[in-house]
Amino acid sequence: MKIKTKLVLIITAVNVACIGVLTIASLRFTQQQITLLADENVRGVAQNSANRIGGWLENYLNKVQALGQIVSHYDTMKPEERRPVINSMLHSLAEENPDLLNVWAIFEPNALDGMDDYFINSPGTDATGRFISRYVRENDAITLNAHTGYTNEGSGGNYYFQSFRSGKEAIIEPYYLSVGGKNKLVTSLTVPLIRSGETIGVAGVDIELTEVQELAGTIRPFGIGDSAVFSHGGIVIAHPDPGRFGKHMKDTEHDLVGIHLGEMVQAVRDGAEAHFKNYWPAIKSDMLIALSPFTVGDSDTPWAFAVAAPERIIMAPVYRMVFISIILGAAILGVLTLIVLVVSKSITSPLKSMEAAFAAIGEGDFTHGLEVRSNDEIGNIGRSFNITLEKMKTLIITIKKQAAALFDIGNALASNMNQTAAAVNQITANIKSIKSQVASQSSSVTETNATMEQITGTINRLSDHIDHQSVSVSSSSSAVEQMLANIQSVTDTLVRNAENAYSLSIASEDGRASLQEVAQDIREIAHESEGLLEINKLMKNIAGQTNLLSMNAAIEAAHAGDAGSGFAVVSGEIRKLAENSGEQSKTIGSVLRKIIASIEKIDRSTGIVLGKFEVIDTGVKTVTNQEANIREAMEEQGVGSHQILETISQLKDITHHVKDGSRKMLSDSREVIEEGKRLEQVTQEITGGMNEMADGADKINAAINQVNEISGKNKESIDILVREVSRFKV
């Protein structure tokens, strides 16, 4: 599957999911909010309507309450005036309110004025004279008659005993009353008549509930709902179905409230609010039903107002919103799909160009680049690709140049290795020559030590002679002949000493010349060793450059993929060659550094020995001069013995000087012997170093031969590298 198709499918799926989730979530939230709002509106309508019906009923109750207030103060009136006043008030109330069916007042026997016997069978009384006045409206005429049936608690008597016994205002359960030859559903609003805290009677009005039914019929929630009014006992007072008036709601409302009927009846009885939802098959919709109680006055028998509204109608805006949201989502999805198509095309077009460029690169052609037209991430990738391609082209060009240079370096390396092999052979020959010279030097040093031992013995004997000379000089004043004999003996001894000093001087000169030759040879060896170090550094640099070149070649081979696999093998062989060359160079460098250190040590020891030889030569010359002086003095003493006595004192002084010089010569001779021993030890160390140098030279020679072979392999690898690099087009 192509990237364009993948992008379209993936982004379209994401858009569908996002739009679907967003639409469903918003519709769900909207539905919940509208349902909640509708439920609150239905309950608000029920509550407002209940307050409206309750207010209408309480308006009539307030008119009866005025009669109760007057009765509570009727003690201020004369007993004979009380009945006329109350009847007058009842008549006025009936006359002022034509919608009242009856206005009445009933007092307990003799509770009003104690004059029941006086008013027996008078208007508004019965045979007992009890005040039971009732004003009835008939044919627009108001007539006074005695109330009847109020003592029967099982039927209409409740309108009297309910307030009488509770001492509270009351609204009586609806009942049917014949009005104008027709049975009308009516109710009574009653007020207890209280004097001194004691209920002495009840006043009330009878009203027809038709107006309540008409009022409830005008209340239609959301323009399509229904309303109903129920009494405290569950009697249907108002309803969309008039056939249910006066019946108990248990018998009539099951089809409308279903399983919630018991809950609704209990709520009406308890005067509690209730709200629920029930499905009405007739309209094929759930109905939201709310019940709100209302009371009249301080009665404890609240009635209830119920409203029902079809959820289908309430939720119609939600359904319209769902439809609109689906259409809008489909439109947005279509627009997004078109946008995705355009975007995916703009994304995949550069990718196709990249595909063609990579195919060309896979064939080794680096001359193709990407055409960049955008400034987005794809454009940045294209620019980066072009930059990388230019760098690769530059790198390949560099590799070609370096391969050519490496080819020249390989040839030069092979030539240099041949020269190096010849130089190493020459060095080996020089080392062998130096080795023989060092052996000769060791023999000379041994002979010099023996000669120095002889000189030391001679100096010891000279010291003894000088001691004897001192004794002789001391006794010369008493025996000149003996002195002359001693002078002759001294002269002979001096001659021998001169000969020995001359021999010592010649041996010292020979030893110094030999040491100078050894020092010159050592300097030549050091110079040759420095040349070897330079060659070794060159080899090390060549190995490092070869290793670096092999690493770069391996990197480029990895970039080239399968096309660079052969190139990677070549780079690996070059890297191994460079590593072997580097190891051999380290070995040669270590051996050369040891040789140079040994040579430097020999050079320092040779310098010290030369210095000592200078001291010995100076001492020998001094002794020779002194001996010549002594001999001349002794000859002069032999010419003229008389002059001996004159020069005895001088001779004593000279003898003391000679003695000191002899001691100094003895000390210097011993130092020369010690230096000779050290020189002999150094010579032995030089001999060991030269042996090591000879072994190192053999190893160097072997390494050079190996490097020479490696150079041949290196040249072959370079030829392969040049051939592989020439395949790339840049």
Image (cartoon, helix red, strand yellow):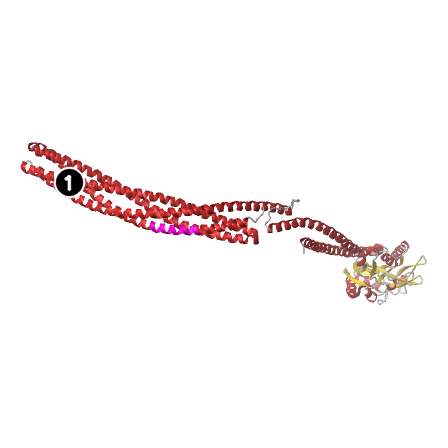
510 with respect to 95 (left or right): left
- Residue 40 percent coordinates (x, y): 77, 56
368 up-or-down from 267: above or below: above
Q: Nearer the viewer, residue 498 or 119?
A: 498
Is most of the magenta stretch helix, strand or loop?
helix
Q: Can you see residue 411?
A: yes
Q: Can you see residue 294?
A: no
Residue denoted by label 1:
497
Q: Work out which quarter of the rendered image holds the N terminus and state it.
A: bottom right
Residue at 50% in and 49% down: 718
Q: How many marks?
A: 1
Q: Secondary structure at mark 1?
A: helix
301 up-or-down from 472: above or below: below
720 with respect to 482 (left or right): right
189 with respect to 603 (left or right): right
- Residue 95 percent coordinates (x, y): 91, 55
- Residue 620 percent coordinates (x, y): 19, 39
12 with respect to 591 (left or right): right
Residue type at the position of mark 1: Asn
Q: Residues within 10 Å of mark 1 (few under 14, many from 20)?
A: many
Q: Nearer the viewer, residue 166 or 450?
A: 450
- Residue 210 drawn in magenta: no
| Quadrant assignment, res 187 | bottom right
Magenta stretch: give its range: 693-709
- Residue 624 percent coordinates (x, y): 17, 37
